[in-house]
Amino acid sequence: MSATTGGSRMLGVVALVSVVAASCGRAAAETESSAQTPADGALQSASLPIASLADRVYLSEDEHIQVEMAIQRCMADKGFEYEFAPFFDGRIELERRYGVTDPQRALEVFAASDEPDAPTNPALDRLDQNERDAWWDAFFGPEQVMIEIDDGAGMIGRPAGGCLEVGWEVVVGDVDRWFKADHEVQAFLRDSYLASMLDARVQAAMHEWSACMGSRGFNVATFDDLDALRGSARDTEMIFADASCNSESDLAAIWFAVESEIQDSLLPKVETEIDELLTGTTLDR
């Protein structure tokens, strides 16, 4: 039996904490921040204040391969074939955090931004239901470990007792502490992003972007509206219009500067928490 699993989807949870951000542009003069402005105006993963912490938590491509090798060995021991899941670099998705201002790069990002789907490999599809269930049980395991989160979020669950956990342990050591560290970074990214969306400077730039898009025949108010239009015959035209309107409105530059300011004010607390959580894991770097 052979299949390509959703391992990269699970690992993508961690990969997504790698942050890519836009240059500060004119907003940099208005908003002081420790974030570094990319000289060429491109979106770069080392820009937002949180990025250095995120890079300590998410798995690199080399680490992903180590996980996959361990899963493959484990699955073979249980009598199943296993094909490596593709590495999903969350930086591709988060490069769209504020939009992409370079038209050609925008085409590449939109083409590459879909996270690998849960497995639909023909080899898995050919198995009968009992064989599929056995394969998944071997991969995910029979257990669900609940991890208590200290920030009021309650509990989060993760699969346990299967080959996926075996793969994770090879690279991160203490899986629970790693999951909690990832949760802290994800929550930080979520909170700073939502707070930035409420800033008057971001809202004004978003309104200007929306009006520009409307003048080009695309009735969108948010990036979610933009995603809903993907797959049409006007995809390329829409992506180029988005890049152009983003540049004209300075949306990416303003938004980046605003969120950087917010992150600067919140970073010391989460930095201490991540340090404590990663101590004792093999990701203590």
Image (cartoon, rainbow, N blue to C red):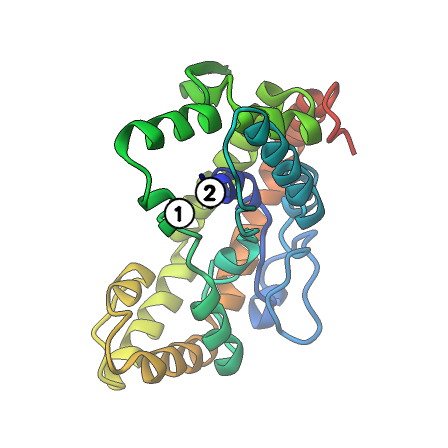
Residue located 44% across and 52% down the image = 116
Query: Split into 4 quadrants, where in the image is the C terminus?
Result: top right
Residue 231 rendering spot, x and y as whole percentages: 27, 71
Residue located 57% across and 31% down the image = 76
* Residue 37 placement, left or right of 201: right
Question: To which quarter of the image does residue 206 belong?
Answer: bottom left
Residue located 74% across and 21% down the image = 279
Residue occupied by mark 1: 123
Task: Name the mark on residue 149.
Answer: none
Residue 66 rendering spot, x and y as whole percentages: 69, 39
Residue located 49% across and 67% down the image = 252
Which residue occupies the foreground of this view, 164 or 19? 164
**Is residue 82 depicted above or below 169 in this figure?**
below
Sort mark 2 into few (<14), some (14-19) or many (20+) by Cα contacts within 10 Å: some
Task: Name the mark on residue 2.
Answer: 2
Kind of residue at badge 1:
Ala
Question: To which quarter of the image does residue 248 belong?
Answer: bottom left
Mark 1, secondary structure of its residue = helix
* Residue 186 placement, left or right of 52: left
Look at the image and tell me whether residue 198 can be seen: no
